[in-house]
Image (spheres, grey):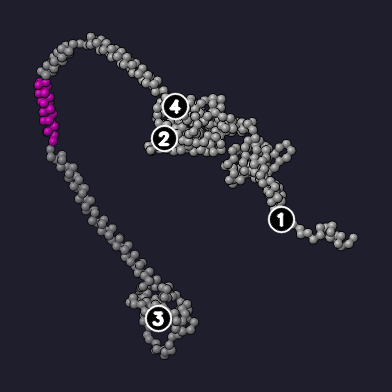
Amino acid sequence: MSEAATTTETGGNARPYSVSELAFALKRTLEDAYGFVRLRGELSKVTHHSNGHVYLTIKDDKAAIDGVVWKGSVRNLSIRPEQGLEVVVTGKITAYPQGSRYQIVIETMEAAGVGALLAQLERLKAKLNAEGLFAPERKTRLPETPAVVGVITSPTGAVIRDILHRIRDRWPCHVIVWPVVVQGDAAPGQVSAAIRGFCALDPAGPIPRPDVLIVARGGGSVEDLWPFNDEGLARTVAACTIPLISAVGHETDTTLIDFVSDRRAPTPTAAAEMATPVLAELKGLVSDHGARMHRCAGRMVEDRRGRVQHADRALKRVPDLVELAAQRFGIVSGRLGAGLSRNAAAHERDLVRVASRLSPLLLKRPQQVQKDRLEALSARLRPCMDRRLERLGERLDGLSKLYASVDPDRPLQRGFARVTRADGSLVHAGASLTSGEEVAIKFGDSVTRQAVIDGADGITAPPAVSKPAAKKSKAPPPEQGDLF
């Protein structure tokens, strides 16, 4: 076989691709060919990552494809991705070059049918029920006579007109309407914002805070009412601090917020009736209670009058009571003078008997005892103070001698001098000084002189002088102490 034939069979002079070039070329080809895809299947391996992205797999009975929902698209999904949910998604096909696999980038997601929606609703209902959001004990009682009613509904439908008409006929009060959309993907967010807005109102502010809220919407299909099955909206209703009535759909329609609200109304008109009493009935009730109160008060007065008359017959006459007291007063007043005289005479005798035992010596004896004790203490005080002062003086002399022995300036008085460098450090050895270095010399008279070091190797060379004649040594001064 020739060399030319061999070259033709192995590819000739075609340039080979690198791995990354081929991978990204395939990625661009997939994205160009499948820029928009609508895909139906069952979700599996759903993973909600901590960074906000959702990774999942869409499968049927024969194949499976990986999918991803980026964080920016998760909040726009109409349903929450869950394991086993049948959905219809839209997005584009792309490739992951590092792993040699393709995937779909999902932009929208919706349930594949009513059965799937109801299955998802049942799972969400069981989850919220397990958390205790459906418990009857956490529901708030509706006020009997609300002054302000808040209504959250569409401002253009027949629902708001029915509610206003019913409230006006039954209980004329202040009604605040918060307009929202009640259908579509934006409905849960707007209704939640309206509930939080009403709860955040200041009772003393320019806009009064409602005493009761009504969330209302007319009837419709399961898909039309599906925004009111949103988990976020249900949690907002459960956390509402104002009593809330759910009036979504007709009597046969049931949404998730019906279970977490404080009361469920079969229709919006019934919600208005639950929220407000009938003014005419209250007036009749008050009138009936007033009549009953007057009758009861009349019977009570008659009963008390009869009891007073019966007690009057059992009491004695006033003159009889006064005469008996006057007689006792006369007897006691007649004996009062003699009793006072006998009492004064008895006290006089006691005084005479005690006065004989009283004398000034009884008072002077304790004074003399205290005076003797004071003189004895005064005589002992002076010697004690003298001995105390003598001991303190001895301690002071000892401290003075100790201070004199450690005084750094004391050696200067005996002819020594202190040499310090320019930075203030003390010179301990002449060998540590260098030629030309400035030093300060302090003498015993506290005079400091400046000097410059001269000589080789930092040692000042002394001038050559003749040795003086030896002098007779003097005896050392007595009691020469240590330098430090």
Instruction: Give the camera-side residue of 25 and 419.
Output: 25
As measured in the structure, the alpha-carbon distance from the residue carrying label 4 to the one carrying label 1 is 71 Å
Task: Quadrant for residue 175, please give it.
Answer: top left
Answer with mark 4 or mark 2, whichever residue precedes in sequence.
Answer: 4
Task: Quadrant for residue 292, please give it.
Answer: top left
Say above or below: 49 vs 160. Answer: below
> Residue 451 shows which numbered tag?
3
Q: Secondary structure at mark 3?
A: strand
Kind of residue indicated by mark 1: Glu
As measured in the structure, the alpha-carbon distance from the residue carrying label 4 to the one carrying label 3 is 112 Å
Kind of residue indicated by mark 4: His
As measured in the structure, the alpha-carbon distance from the residue carrying label 1 to the one carrying label 3 is 84 Å
Residue corresponding to mark 4? 165
Say above or below: 236 vs 320. Answer: below
As measured in the structure, the alpha-carbon distance from the residue carrying label 4 to the one carrying label 2 is 21 Å
State yes or no: residue 305 in magenta.
Answer: no
Residue corresponding to mark 1? 21
Say above or below: 460 vs 188. Answer: below
Kind of residue indicated by mark 2: Arg
Residue corresponding to mark 2? 209
Kind of residue indicated by mark 3: Ala
Q: The C terminus is located in which quarter?
A: bottom left
As measured in the structure, the alpha-carbon distance from the residue carrying label 3 to the one carrying label 2 is 92 Å
Residue displayed at 90% across by 60% down: 1
Q: Start and end of the magenta stretch?
A: 336-358
Residue displayed at 73% across by 57% down: 18
Q: Secondary structure at mark 2?
A: loop
Answer with mark 1 or mark 3, whichever residue precedes in sequence.
Answer: 1
Instruction: Give the camera-side residue of 421 and 399.
Output: 421
